[in-house]
Amino acid sequence: MATLTFSAVHKRYPGGAHAVRGIDLSVADGEVVVLLGPSGCGKTTTLRLAAGLESPTAGEVRIGERVVNGVAPGERDVAMAMQGDALYPHLSVRQNLGFGLKMRGTPRAEIDRRVGEMAERLGVAALQDRRPEELSGGERRRVALGRALVRSPSVLLLDEPLSSLDGPLRTQLRAELATLLRESGTTTLYVTHDQAEAMTLADRLVVMDRGVVRQVGAPLEVYQRPANRFAATYVGSPAMNLVDGVVAAGRFVAGRFAWSVDASDGPLTLGARAEDLRLARDGEPAIGDGRLAIVEHLGHETLAHYDIGGAAAPWVVRLAAGAAVPETAPLGIAPGGVHLFASDETGERIA
Ligand SMILES: Nc1ncnc2c1ncn2[C@@H]1O[C@H](COP(=O)(O)OP(=O)(O)OP(=O)(O)O)[C@@H](O)[C@H]1O
């Protein structure tokens, strides 16, 4: 087990892409840190820098106290599992699981013991004599994860390991993986752009945008108190509702939209999550009248999209399943449900 540390790390590819722009990040011993961000934001590059498949163009990557910038992947004691990783087709499940241990000269009896335990934990014990072609997609993913985990590496690097799976299987394996990572206590850096996966697996979440870290925090902390507009819109589904407007004398106004805020005069962006919006009753304060644009009946809840005038897109209101959805309604924001962000390009949180 070890810590993994990035200090002012940059990666500029020969072709010119500046994929990672000064990342400072530390994964503590036994911690699961998830990199979350849109396509092309530098997640995989960060992981490959930890693996030793790329070297930084500036800054330092350390495993424990050791600077590993120029150290080859095989000398780092890291294990990696990536999306679409192929198993060795001519080897059995047992041999696939034990391959890394064998390469490291682990005694036969210990390989058998560790492989047996891992196969048991991953629910593939009965399949150990099969070849990969005789497995389902989910079973193959389990074996690929097991192959990385069984080595008990200092650092485990996982790049969208569940992305080739569909609905229920993915949910199941996600939960199993969460337990497995906790129990094994392996220092893990995990890349995904799947919200639910990030929220379930992460001790801490790292929100990335165009090669830069925009926020680091526990998943709920990031959800409840996003540090900037980017994190506010990227974390959470549906995304936080936002509207650009101007504050004058304690009143935020954007077109038909108005709400009392505790902020100095000037432009800013006001946000509220779908669950913090409500249909205001008579006499309750309202941001204005919303006009119904779309309703999504999702079974366990209803998402009503209301055009509120000032915002570019309709605001999404989360309602209980089966609740009445009026065509027009005054919308209110629950106490504590208002987020304020700078309207400049940083979009930093103000309150
Ligand atoms: N080998 C490479 N050579 C040149 N540019 C690259 C290389 N690998 C990645 N890039 C560029 O670096 C940037 C970051 O890519 P990276 O794969 O790290 O993003 P990502 O966040 O993992 O994206 P995705 O979610 O799509 O996998 C992108 O602009 C990409 O085009």
Image (spheres, rainbow, N blue to C red):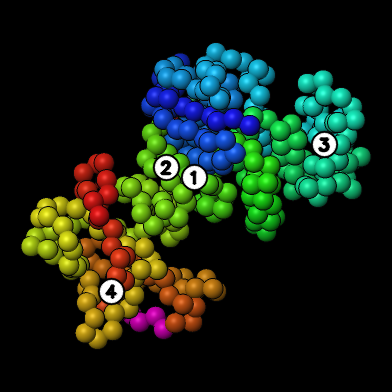
Residue labelled with disc 1: 204
Q: How far across and down, in percent of the image, does residue 186 sit?
A: 64, 38
Magenta span covers which residues? Answer: 324-328
Q: Earlier in the sequence, mark 4 or mark 3?
A: 3
| Mark drawn on residue 114 | 3
* Amino acid type, residue under disc 4 in the picture: Gly
Question: Do labels 1 and 4 touch, CB within 8 Å?
Answer: no
Q: Residue at x 58, y 49 (%)?
A: 201
Q: Quadrant of the N terminus?
A: top right
Q: How far across and down, in percent of the image, does residue 329 sit?
A: 29, 79
Q: Which of marks 2 and 1 is nearer the N terminus?
A: 1
Viewer-side residue, 131 vs 144: 144
Residue labelled with disc 4: 332
**Image vertical order of residue 10 relative to residue 316, above or below:** above
Give the CA distance from mark 1 to mark 4: 32 Å
Question: Do labels 2 and 4 touch, CB within 8 Å?
Answer: no
Q: Earlier in the sequence, mark 1 or mark 4?
A: 1
| Mark drawn on residue 216 | 2
One can see residue 295 in this view: no
Q: Which of marks 3 and 2 is nearer the N terminus?
A: 3
* Amino acid type, residue under disc 3 in the picture: Arg
